[in-house]
Amino acid sequence: MSDLIGALHGIVGAERCLSRAEELFVYECDALTLDRATPAAVVFPHSAGEVQEIVRACRAHDSSFVPRGAGTGLSGGATALEGGVVIECSRMNRIREVDAPNRFAVVEPGVVNSDLSKAVARHGLFYAPDPSSQLACTIGGNVAENSGGPHTLKYGTTTNHVRALEVVLPDGELVRLGSATGVPAGYDLVGAFVGSEGTLGVVTAAWVNLEELPDGVETLLAIFPDVVSACRAVGGIIDAGLVPAALEIVDRRTIEAVEASVYAAGLPTDAGAVLIIELDGLRVSLPRQVERVREIAAGEAASGIEVARDDAERQRFWRARKGAFGAMGRLAPDLYVHDAVVPRTVLPEVLTAICEIADRHRIKLSNVFHAGDGNLHPNISFDRRDADERRRVEAAGAEILELCVKVGGVITGEHGIGTEKRDFMPLLFGPDDLDAMRRLRLAFDPEGVCNPGKVLPTPRFCAEANPHARGYDAVPIE
Amino acid sequence: MSAGVEDAGSRGAAPDEDAPEVWIRPGWEDVYRRSLDCVHCGLCLQSCPTYVETGREISSPRGRIYLMRGVAEGRAPLADTLVDEAFLCLGCRACETACPSGVRYGAMVEGARREIERAGMRAGLAHRLERFALRSVVPRRGRLRLTFDGLAVAQKLRLIELVAPLLPRRLREAAELLPPVPPRGERRRLPGRVPAEGPVRGRVGLLSGCVMQELFGRINAATVRVLARNGFEVIVPPAQGCCGALQAHAGEADLAADLARHNARVFADAGVDMILSNSAGCGAAMRDARDWISEEGALLAERTRDVCEWLDAEGLVAPLGAVPLRVCYDDPCHLVHGQRVEAAPRRLLARIPGLELVAHQDPGACCGAAGTYNLTHPSMSQAVLARKIAALSEADPDVVSTGNPGCLMQLRAGGSRAGLRAEVLHPVELLDRAHAAAPAPRPGNATYS
Ligand SMILES: Cc1cc2nc3c(=O)[nH]c(=O)nc-3n(C[C@H](O)[C@H](O)[C@H](O)COP(=O)(O)OP(=O)(O)OC[C@H]3O[C@@H](n4cnc5c(N)ncnc54)[C@H](O)[C@@H]3O)c2cc1C
Ligand code: SF4
Ligand code: SF4
């Protein structure tokens, strides 16, 4: 047993520290299976105090560390690239406090996203950011990735919902950022921390907003001959001044996969695409909005439009939408979920171009995305065992990102940079921008021990300097 | 726009023709092929009792699948961790109904257990005892009956209480779990054929089960009565044997296949429209038999229904009297996840006048019984049971209803230990009571009792 493992045992006990090779094997990747690396150990702290001690032990033994939630991240954020210690927060899963009158809750990082909404429902409240992975992903992961979801269109991403954070900094100090009122005094350090992908420290508690459940909700399903006309309808709805809670497009290939799964909701498998439109607000305001949406959809060649009859049907629509990524497993053993944002107005052209790229590289593409935000998820189904296919997948992915940046977009909407897009940062940022970010990071983590190798391309990890630096190359696949 | 889907639907264990060549550990081919359906999305994590309890990826469906794939590919060693995890898994298959990708986890873990068993990687007295029981007692009616006779005597003479302090902890707990063995009369064999009452609506076979008949003979009798009252002639082939579920779960694949083959023949000879099971675990095994024995298995799969599913589909015709009780229906894993039967038992119970169905938290979560799991992994089993009992206590029903012998035992033992006042009954027992309470029984009909 190494000294480090011994030290970790001293803090959490042998029970809460995994170090056998086969146990570590399953921690070699998150939901992005392309990039892999085996950690030195996985520890399960129960308290902020234990996290502090773990971080200090890592420092004392020259080990890096990586915070982890449920490992549903799609950009390799929770992968221990340098073989450091994974600090698994799943056991810190208490809701410390619910302050219903002041509309906030204090939660530990391991609380599962949907459990929070479930727990506060009896106060007529909910937690708004709703990633499709919400049945599994944790608040800690959401904070780190600044996660969004279908309802981000109206309610914003995680950053709009975090008032304060308790974090263990990379030197082991426990600090509180922000205030429970949600109004920061001085620099907005919470703003800097949210979306930092586990590179600035470990979140041990979050003060998050709770929203009132809306008075009324209407969920519509509009059926289109193709994705492009669905995109036009999205533009029409927003131009009309409506503010739907969600506008989600699901294309044909995705519909077929979902309808073959346990999440089947009776979506029409012969449609080119469906657009899910959710309207919420005062009940009296909804009928007119529903009418307006109907008109706009019909004007864009929608062949039909259904309104969810009740809550059960609404849940079915959403379960189908949210099960979509997983259902793609029916097409091939692996899935590469892409994530990029483009200005909403160019969606039709961009989608056409993306399909052309996919065809040219002979890859299996499907699209299911947050259309209202212009947040695309071109999903590529592939087989990681096929080296040639993997190369084509990566080439197509790179081209898609370049295209998105060219039209004024960004390279991630909600899944983060992680290892996956680190080398694409120069597409978007010049050396000065990257240097400014690096300096922010160094202010928190001067020695580079906290989730190293993520987000920022470093000379060591730069694709040009070392094309073999990505994690998966460390593990022979063939 | 790209072309449509060429290969929608899970590939399951079907060989993938244009798959790249990779070395696969001999014997692990089926496990490996099934593992390819998993895209590592994690949507199954919170459905898994052992993940919820431990928070460990390695004790989650996704982690176990990843490890099984790794072992099959030779990237991970075939070592103790896999053995521990393959058996720490309850086999509840909640991960299957959560999985959008159609992963057939249950079949995969059974494959891994089979290979573990073949490699002789399990040791210890408990394992040898289990194997002896599964090979030489459970499948043999006579021996099983003698075992329960012995147990009945021991219980009557309070022998178990006397020797309990001397027993190893596990055996002591096992003994506590067992309900009093019913008198032999209740355990006596069902008649081979029971005529339908009134106009005949069909001819069904009943899988009478091994443990079911010995410990829950009353439920079997109630099942036959309810079916007959509703116009079904019931055939209970005396030659039928154990379904093979326990053996398959334990990795005894060859034995399970033999047992299934035998039953396929017996029921084919019986000439019934449908084979009915009142034990979720047995029903699921009959339906999964196609994984063990392809041809006869497919027939079994097609021809097996859960008794509640059947009655719900065919409709109850006998009059129902009032049973004024508050009832929590708790889904047996192998019914809701294994056979995807969820609404039927609830609809049936809702038809009983005066009966109020009461909701409780997570009715589809495992109770921790899982066959012999409560004996092999008592602490995890107790932790899982504790959640169930807490949910039921909150709802505070008069009756907890569930359709699987293991769950009936587990909920009875756990409930009484926790001071839960509810009676634990099979849904057909409630139907049987309702029929008995019906105002005017039609005269002249002989009923089996
Ligand atoms: C099927 C599927 C659907 C998805 N849908 C969406 C979606 O709609 N919207 C969306 O935004 N994302 C989505 N995602 C991506 C993913 O679920 C989110 O990024 C999520 O927030 C990750 O949470 P996690 O708990 O799994 O974190 P992990 O994957 O474990 O970690 C993610 C990152 O967070 C860091 N981290 C974790 N815990 C802490 C902590 N306590 N302190 C500091 N850093 C920490 C890790 O280091 C890592 O960098 C989806 C993923 C899947 C598989
Ligand atoms: S839900 Fe299915 S595809 Fe997703 S990780 Fe679990 S088993 Fe794999
Ligand atoms: S069968 Fe049950 S215990 Fe086993 S992995 Fe699936 S959900 Fe978990």
Image (tube, grey):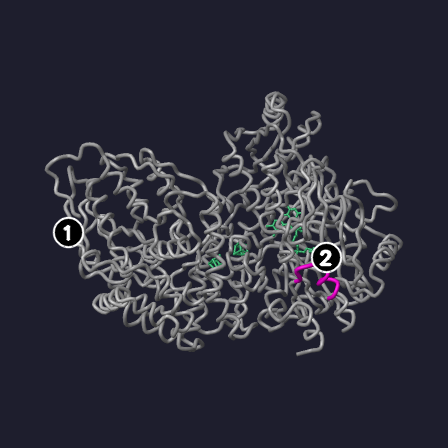
Instruction: Answer yes or no: disc 1 within 8 Å of ligand 3.
Output: no
Q: Is residue B137 left or right of residue A248?
A: left
Seen in the picture, residue A433 relative to A409 is either above or below; the reply is: below
Q: Residue at x 28, y 41 (%)?
A: B431
Q: Is residue B239 left or right of residue B34?
A: left
Front residue of A89/A14: it is A14
Q: Is residue B380 visible?
A: yes
- Asked if residue A98 lies in the magenta stretch, the reply is no
Instruction: Answer yes or no: disc 2 within 8 Å of ligand 1.
Output: yes
According to the picture, the residue beneath numbered tag 2 turns out to be: A418
* Quadrant in the picture for the C terminus of chain A: bottom right
Q: Amino acid at mark 2?
A: Gly
Q: Give the residue at the far left of this rendering.
A: B444
Front residue of A282/B73: it is A282
Residue B289: x and y in percent read 33, 60
According to the picture, the residue beneath numbered tag 1 turns out to be: B193
- Asked if residue A48 lies in the magenta stretch, the reply is yes
Subunit that carries the residue with mark 1: B
Instruction: Please tell me how many numbered marks the rendered image carries.
Output: 2
The span picked out in magenta is A45-53
Q: Amino acid at mark 1?
A: Arg
Q: Secondary structure at mark 1?
A: strand
* Quadrant in the picture for the N terminus of chain A: bottom right
